[in-house]
Amino acid sequence: MNTTPDSILLAGQGPLYSELRQLIESMNYLVITTDSYEQSPMPVRLAIEVTNSDLTLKKNTLQHLDHLLSSDIPILTTSMAFTATESASWTTHSNRVCGFGTFVPLIERHLIEIAPALQTSPPIVEQAAAFFRSLGKNIAVVQDEIGLVFPRVLSLIINEAVFTVMEETATIADIDLAMKNGTNYPYGPLEWADRIGLDEVYAVVCGLHRDLAEERYRPAPLLRKMVLAGRIGRSSGQGFYSYQSAREGDQA
C-alpha cells in the first residue's frame, strides 16, 4: 500500500506563504519548493503561487512554474492585486492557471474564493475546489476581478479608514471602536489592517486603482507611506498600533 502523501509545490512571497504551508502540512500533504523540485523532480498534485505586491516576481515565478511542470499540473495563483486572466496570460499553458484569494490569518478564514481566469479549463477549477475543501475550507467561485470579494471590500473599508485618520476625524482607537460597535465586525478596520499586513491591503487597493482607474480606488497616501516605511503591522512590530513589546517578548 502506497502511503506517500501528495506533494504540493508552494512558491512566491508574502504572509500567506507560511500560513498556507502550515495548513497544507497539517492535512498530511508534502510541501515542496521550486528549488527542491528542480533538484529532485517528483509527482505533484498542483502548484500554488502566492505573491501579491511584486509584479516582476509574480510574473517570473509563474513563468518558471509553467516551464518547470508538465502541462497537466494545475497552477493556483493569488488574484489579489492582479487578475487571474492577466497572470495566466504570462504563461504558455494558460488553461491550467486558476486564481484564488484570501487574507491571513488563515485560521480565521472559513472560506477561500476561487476566481477562474478566462483561459481556465473547467477541470482545473474542479481540482482547485477539491483541494481547498481538503484543507477544511468552504469554497465560493467568483468572477475574476482584482481582490475578489472579501479582500476587495475589506481593503476598501480599511483604505477609507486611513483617509479618516488623515483627516483627523477621530483617533485611530476611536475609529476602530466606532466600527466594531457600529457593524459588529470582529476588529476595527485599522486593527484588521495590522493583522492582515498593510502591504497586502495596499497591493489590493493599488491593483483596483490601476485596473479600473477610478478615483474611489485611490490608495490613501498615509497607507502608502506606512508601507514604504516598513510599518506594515503585527509582522513588523509597528502599524497603526505598536507591537514592539510582544516581539521583544517572543525574542526573550
Image (cartoon, rainbow, N blue to C red):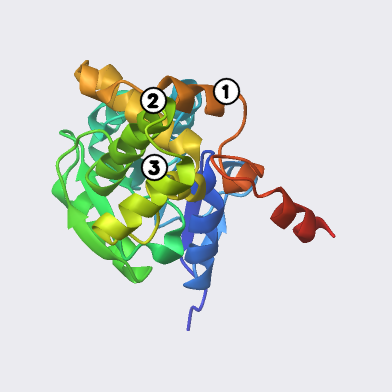
> Can you see residue 163?
yes
Residue occupying image coordinates x 36% and y 44%? 75
Residue 237 against residue 139 in the figure, above or below: above
**Marks 1, 3: nearer the viewer:** 1
**Marks 3, 2: nearer the viewer:** 2
* Quadrant in which the C terminus is drawn: bottom right
Q: Secondary structure at mark 3?
A: loop
- Going by the numbered disc 3, the residue's amino acid type is Ser
Instruction: Give the total number of marks visible in the rendering.
Output: 3
Residue 173, position as x, y percentages in the image: 47, 47
Question: Would you say the residues marked 1 and 3 are in contact, meaning their CB atoms lie under 8 Å apart?
Answer: no
> Are there few (<14), some (14-19), or many (20+) residues within 10 Å of tag 2?
few
Residue 187 against residue 74 in the figure, above or below: below
Residue 200, position as x, y percentages in the image: 45, 37
- Looking at the image, is mark 3 or mark 2 earlier in the sequence? 3
Q: CA distance from mark 2 to mark 1?
A: 20 Å
Horizontal side of residue 21 vs 235, given as left or right: left
> Can you see residue 128?
no
Horizontal side of residue 13 vs 85, given as left or right: right
The disc label shown at residue 228, or none: 1
Where residue 108 sits, quadrant-wise, is bottom left
Residue 53, position as x, y percentages in the image: 46, 29
**Which residue is labeled 3 in the image?**
70
> Are there few (<14), some (14-19), or many (20+) residues within 10 Å of tag 3?
few
Residue occupying image coordinates x 34% and y 57%? 180
**Marks 2, 1: nearer the viewer:** 2
**Which residue is labeled 2 in the image?**
167
